[in-house]
Image (tube, coloured by chain):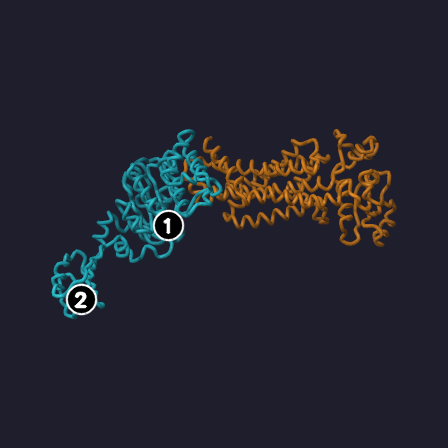
């Protein structure tokens, strides 16, 4: 394990932000951390990075007893905070150079590394400009650049794509995937399920300060969902059709609206063939089965939608 | 050391590249000096064709005050009638003079009919200069007479520079303005510490391997050096453009300016660490800056009555006292105490700032 949090309790007065949280990050993986507002994701990151102390529990990084606040440990971590943390009157190059020097990167190595990061993030052409003149996406990219200038082994990204255009989002996701391919372990939190589905090899779902589900995206959707939906478009469907389909094993309900039949079954029923068989006397114009998503799994597990307002913990 | 230098250099650039900062701390004072300096200079200078201000003086024409008022540079602004106390009071009551000045065993009091105008301010400034700026030494230098013969008191034995001169409007005004500007530079410290320790950038800095002393020291060095250079811009500008006389004890003047820069940084850093809200701190600091400047007087003398004794300890007033004293001669003991006080207060404020921020930095 590159990082682990065991039985962590963190309270803010009467509010328990982390309630006996157990979390482990495996070396080389991209771990997604999902949770609704107030789930404790940001607090977990603050505890993991040593920005916040704990009331109980243990944090270990890099399989070492060295405290998380020690310089030797700090040099191996990069944090991309949720809010932009840049010196806006300095140029992108100056921002990167400053953080490079803080992490002990100096001289020619620093110059080379700054150029490399600017290239990777697509900011070389505007390196001399102040971030004040940047678009939201460019600022987000520079925000990431400041966290990776020292080549961290563990990169933590807290909502890195909030409020940016699709092009910049893609750029950032490509970049995260590339970092992971090069061996960097990544902890990624986001409101956007499709991002987590794309970049994360494993996902933790948090609610009320603890982990409530864990696994790959496929595992989570398979084990968390109780219903599947098939939609058929049929020419002139008679009421008998809905009745017949309703009797198929595993079908919970069949609703007709115009030409559309929406058939809801218990998850894992594998009854699609029998549903189609019932509909075969009719002209079937189209059929689709909704593939369960992480969003569905999240909703099923927490009873909450992920993007209900902004995430501020 | 690398991290300290990196933080210092970052802070220095951050402040100098902030256009608002530059506008407020460099352009604004220069513009104000250009406007007000020119306005004052147009009215009050040794070359001004200003009608003499009628005053009544209840004092010995051959005494130090009398001689001072009759020196060539001063008397051209005044139409003096030497008389006794009753006569002076009567002239003031009749408003045939703009001020009546009484001297009684070294104590000087002034009666002003009405609120007075430019002439009244002129008279007040002249008397203020007599009271505060080693007038005996000035007269000795200007009259060519033996200082010991003029003074019926213990003599403060100190070399009197032969070039001593009567301070002019801009000499006062430049000191007041410079001290006020330096007080304002406390905003530099507030900006840097607020951004570098309390914001998300603060988290980022704290997550880096930089040590706390290097981080705090780097930020403090950046705000102090930047602020000092901003003060120097005004110092050089007023000397070069208006010929402001900064005296012959330049190192003492510069040391005082340094002490005052430290004071302004420590005050704002303490406030921001204690209150953790830059907007609130900014508002409080602005009120303090203007109040301290106002009660400390400057070129335009304001009579606060009994409160004058309290207001002499206002930060700006202490800096004025040291700088005027260094330029024109003053009470050395008082200057030394005030200088030590400025350093001491700064040290205390920095300690308090650290105590307020220690949990945040933990």
The image position of residue A168, as x and y in percent, is 36, 46
Label 2: how many Cα within 10 Å (few below 14, some 14–19, many 20+): some
**Which residue position holds label 2?**
A235
Q: What element carries label 1?
A: loop
Residue in view at x 75 percent, y 31 percent: B163
Chain the render paints orange: B
Chain the render paints cyan: A
Q: Is mark 2 on a helix, strand or loop?
A: loop
Left or right, B279 with respect to B248, comes to left
User: In which quarter of the view is residue B347 placed?
Assistant: top right
Left or right, A292 with respect to B288, comes to left
**Which residue position holds label 1?**
A165
- Distance between mark 1 and mark 2 Cα atoms: 41 Å
Residue in view at x 31 percent, y 45 percent: A7
Label 1: how many Cα within 10 Å (few below 14, some 14–19, many 20+): few
**Same chain assignment for discs 1 and 2:** yes
Given residues A258 and B114, the one toward you in this image is A258
């Amino acid at each position: 394990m590159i990082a682990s949090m065991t039985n962590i309790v963190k309270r803010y007065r009467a509010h328990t932000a982390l309630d006996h949280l157990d979390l482990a990050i495996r070396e080389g993986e991209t771990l997604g951390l999902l949770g609704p507002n107030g789930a404790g994701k940001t607090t977990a990151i603050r505890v993991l990075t040593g920005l916040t102390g704990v009331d109980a529990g243990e944090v270990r990084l890099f399989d070492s007893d060295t405290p998380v606040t020690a310089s030797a440990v700090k040099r191996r971590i990069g944090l991309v905070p949720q809010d932009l943390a840049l010196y806006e009157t300095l140029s992108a190059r100056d921002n990167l150079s400053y953080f490079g020097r803080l992490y002990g990167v100096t001289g020619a190595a620093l110059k080379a590394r700054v150029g490399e990061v600017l290239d990777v993030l697509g900011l070389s052409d505007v390196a001399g400009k102040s971030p004040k003149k940047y678009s939201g996406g460019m600022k987000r990219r520079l925000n990431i650049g400041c966290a990776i200038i020292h080549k961290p082994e563990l990169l933590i990204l807290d909502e890195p794509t909030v409020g940016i255009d699709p092009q910049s989002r893609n750029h950032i996701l490509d970049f995260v995937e590339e970092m992971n391919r090069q061996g960097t372990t990544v902890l990624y939190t986001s409101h956007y399920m499709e991002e987590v589905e794309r970049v994360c090899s494993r996902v933790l779902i948090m609610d009320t300060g603890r982990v409530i589900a864990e696994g790959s995206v496929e595992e989570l959707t398979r084990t968390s969902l109780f219903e599947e939906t098939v939609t058929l478009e049929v020419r002139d469907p008679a009421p008998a059709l809905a009745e017949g389909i309703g009797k198929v094993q595993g079908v919970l309900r069949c609703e007709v609206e115009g030409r559309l039949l929406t058939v809801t079954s218990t998850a894992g029923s594998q009854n699609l063939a029998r549903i189609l068989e019932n509909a075969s006397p009719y002209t079937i114009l189209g059929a689709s089965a909704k593939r369960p998503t992480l969003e569905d799994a999240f909703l099923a597990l927490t009873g909450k939608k992920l993007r209900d307002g902004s995430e501020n913990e | 050391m690398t991290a300290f230098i990196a933080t210092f250099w970052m802070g220095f650039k951050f402040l100098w590249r902030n256009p608002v900062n530059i506008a407020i701390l460099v352009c604004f004072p220069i513009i104000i000096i250009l406007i007000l300096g020119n306005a004052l200079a147009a009215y009050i200078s040794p070359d001004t064709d200003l009608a003499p201000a009628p005053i009544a003086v209840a004092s010995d024409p051959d005494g130090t005050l009398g001689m001072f008022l009759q020196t060539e540079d001063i008397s051209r602004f005044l139409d003096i009638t030497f008389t006794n106390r009753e006569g002076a009071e009567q002239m003031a009551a009749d408003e045939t003079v703009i001020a009546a000045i009484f001297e009684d065993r070294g104590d000087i009091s002034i009666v002003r009919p009405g609120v007075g105008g430019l002439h009244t301010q002129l008279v007040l400034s002249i008397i203020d200069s007599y009271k505060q700026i080693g007038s005996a030494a000035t007269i000795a230098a200007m009259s060519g007479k033996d200082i010991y013969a003029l003074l019926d008191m213990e003599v403060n034995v100190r070399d009197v520079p032969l070039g001593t001169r009567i301070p002019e409007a801009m000499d006062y005004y430049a000191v007041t303005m410079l001290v006020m500007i330096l007080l304002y530079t406390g905003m530099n410290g507030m900006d840097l510490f607020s951004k570098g320790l309390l914001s998300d950038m603060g988290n980022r800095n704290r997550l880096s391997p930089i040590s706390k002393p290097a981080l705090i020291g780097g930020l403090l060095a950046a705000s102090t050096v930047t602020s000092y250079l901003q003060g120097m811009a005004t110092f050089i500008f007023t000397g070069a453009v208006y010929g402001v006389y900064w005296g012959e004890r330049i190192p003492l003047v510069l040391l005082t300016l340094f002490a005052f820069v430290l004071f302004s940084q420590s005050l704002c850093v303490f406030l921001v660490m204690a209150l953790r809200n830059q907007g609130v701190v900014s508002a409080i600091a602005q009120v303090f800056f203007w109040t301290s400047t106002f009660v400390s007087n400057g070129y335009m003398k304001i009579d606060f009555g009994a409160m004058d004794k309290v207001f002499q300890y206002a930060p700006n007033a202490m800096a004025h006292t040291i700088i005027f004293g260094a330029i024109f001669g003053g009470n050395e003991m008082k200057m030394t105490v005030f200088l030590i006080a400025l350093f001491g207060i700064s040290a205390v404020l920095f300690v308090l700032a650290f105590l307020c921020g220690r949990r945040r930095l933990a």
